[in-house]
Image (spheres, grey):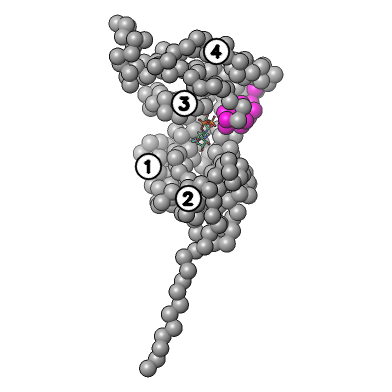
Amino acid sequence: AVVGIVMWRQPPQHQEWKGAGTTAHFYEIILGRCYTYTQIVRPELGHKDCQKIGKAFTNAFLSKDPCGSTEQDYEPLMELTNQTVPCDKTLLWSKTNELVHEYAWVQRELFTLENTLLGYMADGLRWCGDPGSPEMNYQSCPDRRTDCSNNSVSVFWNTVSKRFAEDACGVVHVLLNGSVHNTFDERSTFARVEVFNLHPEKVHTLQAWVMQDIRNISSDSCSDASIKNLKLILSKRNITFTCENNYRPIRFLQCVKYPEHSSCRSKI
Ligand code: N1C
């Protein structure tokens, strides 16, 4: 009798990292989001080639060291996903992830990065590859703090945030959190990347809306030391800075969530 030799294929052995692995079904999700965005959300982008965009996305990190990610890795993806945001409609944020997207949902003409194709595709996902394998690493990915800062996800957000700021024109808005210790946090993407990549020839003003948690409204956040720092940085860059505490239209959104709160109870 012929005795067959059974070859057991080992599951791919990836390097182990401290962070969670690639989001399950990553490729299908980005492809689906690309079609949703270009066919339904913004049909004027219906000519974009989602198959090509999906391949360019995964080619940026597959078979590569996930701690050696570079801006150049994402260059082909960036070229395929260029998109114009109208002047005065760019909305930046820091530490206000939920509120800013609620506001952008209502004010449909405003664009956060997640309202552009690339931000929409990547929002909330994780991904990384491995130099020794052509597959994604679903087991673990580098943690920004304990493994490396040049990881595939952080480099992606730095790269797309940089382009988003470079492309902005007119008045740019930013929604900041007045209820955290550093309202303008020098380590944030907004501070490290976006503020320094606004072009003063195109962007004359940065208008900040500083929102406080409705459950503990404190004093004037615009006079906070970190905001003074932001103002100084912008004046050196020849960009006018304006700041408004608890901007009313956004306060109304907070009131939708806490209608019984005292600052929401007055009859308009
Ligand atoms: O570091 P942040 O905020 O200041 O980044 C926000 C800032 C926005 O203006 C966006 O244009 O930078 C851009 N941006 C995103 O749009 C984004 N979506 C999801 C930056 N990061 C983004 N993420 C993820 O959230 C990413 O993993 C990054 O590390 C966090 C940023 O959160 P933050 O500190 O509140």
User: Which amino acid type is marked by label 2?
Assistant: Gly
Task: Compute the Cα span from label 1 to label 3.
Answer: 25 Å
User: Which amino acid type is marked by label 1?
Assistant: Thr
Q: Is residue 254 above or below residue 40?
A: above
Q: Does the magenta stretch mainly form a helix, a strand or a loop?
A: helix
Q: State whether residue 46 appears in this view.
A: no
Residue 199 % position (x, y): 64, 26
Q: State whether residue 251 appears in this view.
A: yes
Quarter of the picture holding the C terminus: top left
Instruction: Tell me the element at label 1.
Output: helix
> Is ligand 1 closer than 8 angstroms to the Cβ of mark 1?
no
In front: 149, or 216? Answer: 216
Q: Quadrant of residue 105?
A: top left
**Of label 1 and label 3, which has the lower sequence position?**
1
Q: Nearer the viewer, mark 3 or mark 2?
A: 2
Q: Are marks 1 and 4 in contact (CB under 8 Å)?
A: no
> Mark 1 — residue?
36
Q: Residue at x 61, y 45 (%)?
A: 148
Residue 253 % position (x, y): 36, 19
> Mark 3 — residue?
96
Task: Compute the Cα span from label 4 to label 2.
Answer: 39 Å
